[in-house]
Amino acid sequence: MIGWPDPRLFKKVGDLTLQKSQNLCGRVLQQNTQACAFYERHGFKAGKQGINQINNQPNIEYHWRDR
């Protein structure tokens, strides 16, 4: 029987992905508070707000803090 991966693995993957993507920006639906908290916890700052072109929901653009 195969068990579930260790949750620490997912955290490590997320951390490594962030290290590689700090020169990018991320657009997050405003209602996705978990994603917003994730970006902010890792040093991204909220920027321009807009409307998602696919579902017409409000979104926030996040940028790495040193940008």
Image (cartoon, rainbow, N blue to C red):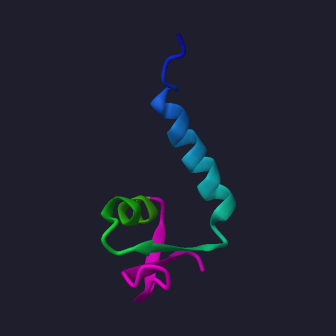
Residue 2 pos. (x, y %):
54, 15
Q: In the figure, 58 relative to 5: above or below?
A: below
* Residue at 67% in and 72% down: 23
| Quarter of the picture holding the C terminus | bottom right
Instruction: State the extent of the magenta-drawn residues as a range.
Output: 42-67
Left or right side of 25 for 59: left
Which picture quadrant has residue 33? Answer: bottom left
Q: Is residue 56 magenta?
A: yes
Residue 8 location, x and y as percent? 49, 32
Residue 52 colored in magenta in the image: yes
Considering depth in this image, is 56 or 37 the residue closer to the camera?
A: 56
Residue 59 percent coordinates (x, y): 40, 80
Q: Which quadrant holds residue 36? A: bottom left
The outermost residue toward the top is 1
**Along the line of sight, the residue nearer the viewer: 29 or 38:** 29
Residue 62 in the image, given as x and y percentages of width and height = 49, 76
Q: Residue at x 36, y 81 (%)?
A: 57
Q: Residue at (49%, 70%) from the top-left corner?
A: 44
Q: Please say if 1 is above or below 54.
A: above
In the visual, does 59 lie left or right of 15?
left
Tell how many labels.
0
